Amino acid sequence: MHIGYFLAIILLQASLRPCQKTKGPNGCTPGALPRGTYGVNCTYGDETVRHGKIKGRLPPSCLGLYCWNGTLTPIRCQIPKPRSISGETYVRPNETWPRCCYWRRQCPYVE
């Protein structure tokens, strides 16, 4: 009984070897995509965002711009404004994304 399983495995391996040597469907060797269809940069106004990178924007927009193969995806801030408990005010810092997403408590100046 065990010899039958052993022979079946050998026959299966022998039959799969020619499949492993073929070049794929239609005899084509799989490889990289055609030139110009991968790694396309994005533009946003007069700015260029490189493929696979994130570029931060300054407030008031405070966006992260993610580029993938020519498609630009905006990343918005997900942090809501904190509730004021004692009358303090919260402002966003004048920095690029993602630092502009955080809130800072603005202290009143005493003169």
Image (cartoon, rainbow, N blue to C red):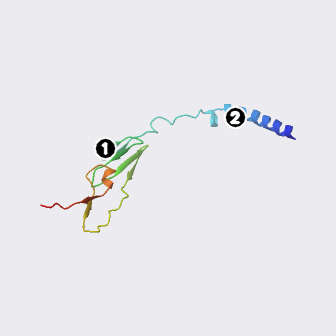
Tag 1: residue type? Glu
| Residue 97 image position (x, y, % from top left) | 32, 50
Under tag 2, what secondary structure?
Answer: helix
Residue sitting at x 87%, y 41%: 1
Compared with residue 88, is residue 102 higher up or lower down, i.e. above or below? above
| Residue 34 image position (x, y, % from top left) | 49, 35
Could you say which quadrant of the image residue 14 lies in? Answer: top right
Residue sitting at x 72%, y 32%: 17
Residue sitting at x 38%, y 53%: 75
**Which residue is nearer to you in this view: 13 or 88?**
88
| Residue 6 image position (x, y, % from top left) | 82, 37
Crowding around mark 1 (Cα neighbors within 10 Å: few <14, some 14 to 19, many 20+) is: few
Q: In which quadrant of the rendered image does the C terminus lie? A: bottom left
In three-dimensional space, the C-alpha distance between marks 1 and 2, rounded to whole angstroms, equals 49 Å
- Earlier in the chain: of badge 1 and badge 2, it is 2
Q: Which mark is residue 47?
A: 1
| Residue 21 image position (x, y, % from top left) | 67, 31
Q: Which residue is mark 2?
A: 19
